[in-house]
Amino acid sequence: MMPLVNEYSIGLDLGGTNLRAAAIDRSGAILEKTSGSTQFSAGRQAVMEEMVSSISGLRAKLGAAGLAGIGIGVPGFIVFKEGVIRNSNNLPFLENFPIRQELQQRLGSFVILENDANAAALGEKWMGAGREVDDLVLLTLGTGIGGGIIAGGRVVRGHNGMAGELGHIVTVPNGNPCGCGSQGCVEKHASATAVTAMARLMQLGENLSSKEVHDLAHEKSQRGAKAREIWRVMGESLGCTLAMLINTFNFPLYLLSGGMLPAWDLFGPPMMQAVERQSATYRLTKDTTRIEQATLGNEAGLYGAAYLPWIEDRPATA
Ligand SMILES: [Zn+2]
């Protein structure tokens, strides 16, 4: 028998500096939205409290009977089955804490914990640029670079949940050191942070945003030429990453998201040249392999988190 309630799920995105949550129905319509006010610097108890109150608030408005489950997107390396963050630069105070179990107990609802970029990739597959395909890769270009892989409509997690850490693909052997312990990771050469750092090293300014470096690159001056060089290096590093991904997966769609996308006019051409040069698979499948901009922006993670309860099995402990 069909239930007589309107079913919905709740997606929560714990990215950046605070949290956002939304109640979304099975068709992808956002029914209610909320954002938290607690700064992450307030620590674990405060953030857990904020998650519980955001979710309870949405559930109270829409009715507990219709709630299919809760998906939470968090930055960091996740142990999916345990619902635990093993390592996170953004949320160190949540590391090795049983987040999923704690939330399930306090809320009495089915909870799934997912990496934020995986959730964003799933969101793009459900309601964004990837709606027409079952297989895609998303790279989120921010202060770091996140990655999510969707195959057969599902998140590829590996055996722990740590697959898709694509920001740590090495594109420059012996390149810039990375917090992960490696050197030359693409996020050290093609993230917003990397663009700002390159601008500083090239004496264009101490703390330029990627937008400022983009604007500068359109100037016909010595400084403009330096800024264009930054975007060339950034594009080549990204292109190298995409070439490896295309060679690995032969998927039809590779999406880029994040605040640097407006600079595509500058990094796009060197990126595509690198893809052409480094991926035979791309050259042979050019007419059916697309590299495009994601379309959901900040909302992708919310959509993906909310979609998880519809497609994932309930763990035995739930
Ligand atoms: Zn790294």
Image (cartoon, rainbow, N blue to C red):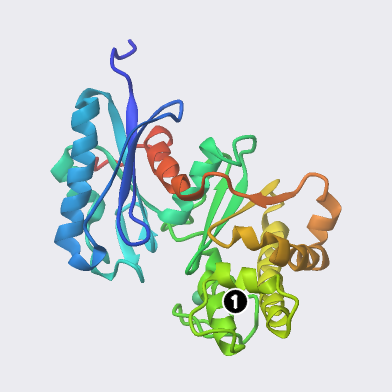
* 191 displayed left or right of 162: right
The answer to whether residue 183 is visible is no
Q: Residue at x 18, y 31 (%)?
A: 60
Residue 151 percent across, percent down from the top left: 58, 45
Residue 164 percent across, percent down from the top left: 52, 59
* 60 displayed left or right of 152: left
Q: Look at the numbered disc 1 and give the secondary structure of its residue.
A: helix
Q: Quadrant of the N terminus?
A: top left
* 142 displayed left or right of 64: right
Q: Residues within 10 Å of mark 1 (few under 14, many from 20)?
A: many
Camera-side residue of 299 and 65: 299
Q: Quadrant of residue 277?
A: bottom right
Residue type indicated by callout 1: His
Q: Quadrant of the C terminus?
A: top left
Q: Is residue 301 above or below residue 236?
A: above
Total number of numbered labels? 1
Mark 1 and ligand 1: say if the CB distance to the nearest ligand atom is below 8 Å.
no
Camera-side residue of 112 and 67: 67
Residue carrying label 1:
189
* 318 displayed left or right of 303: left
Q: Is residue 205 above or below residue 231?
A: below
Camera-side residue of 97 and 211: 211
Residue 101 percent across, percent down from the top left: 21, 50
Residue 47 percent across, percent down from the top left: 20, 57
Q: Residue at x 20, y 27 (%)?
A: 64
Q: Is residue 209 above or below residue 50?
A: below
